Image (spheres, rainbow, N blue to C red):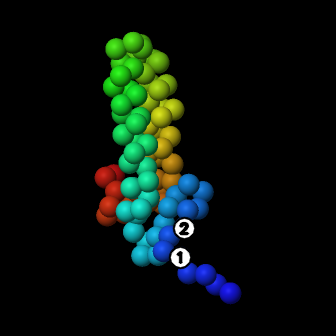
Amino acid sequence: MVIQTSFIKFWGVTVDNTLSWKRHIAAITPKLNKACYIIRRSRLYLSQVALKMVYYAFFHLVMFYGLIFWGNSTDSVY
């Protein structure tokens, strides 16, 4: 028996049944907003090197995970 679903999350990348990335983008947007907030608040207290580590830990990790698959989407910003 095959069960039809409207989307699937595979290795952290959400793909819907129309192969659009709107659901994935909607899922990572709050994470990216949180990362931007953390970076913005931390820049008053941290050095450039430490801020770069915060960027890679919070923003870069979320933004670029699975980009090879969803980066060519018309819904993506890259």
Disc 1 + disc 2, Cβ < 8 Å: yes
Q: Which residue is mark 2?
A: 8
The tag on residue 28 is none
Image coordinates of residue 76 in percent, x first then y, are: 34, 56
Image coordinates of residue 42 in percent, x first then y, are: 39, 20
The tag on residue 5 is 1
Farthest right residue in view = 1
Q: Is residue 44 above or below residue 63?
A: above
In the picture, which quadrant includes the N terminus? bottom right
- Residue at point 46% right, 70% down? 16
- Residue at point 42% right, 14% down? 46
Give me the C-alpha separation between circle 1 and circle 2: 7 Å
Image coordinates of residue 18 in percent, x first then y, are: 42, 76
* Badge 2 element: strand
Q: Amino acid at mark 2?
A: Ile
- Residue at point 37% right, 62% down? 22
Count every numbered label the image shows and give the total.
Answer: 2
Image coordinates of residue 23 in percent, x first then y, are: 41, 62
Q: How many residues crowd mark 1 within 10 Å: few (<14), some (14–19), many (20+)?
A: few
| Of residues 27 and 50, the one drawn nearer to the viewer in this rendering | 27
Q: Is residue 14 above or below residue 59?
A: below
- Residue at point 50% right, 70% down? 7
Q: Is residue 57 above or below residue 73?
A: above
* Quarter-of-image position of residue 25: bottom left
| Of residues 69 and 35, the one drawn nearer to the viewer in this rendering | 35
Q: How many residues crowd mark 2 within 10 Å: few (<14), some (14–19), many (20+)?
A: some
Q: Is residue 58 above or below residue 3?
A: above
Q: Amino acid at mark 1?
A: Thr
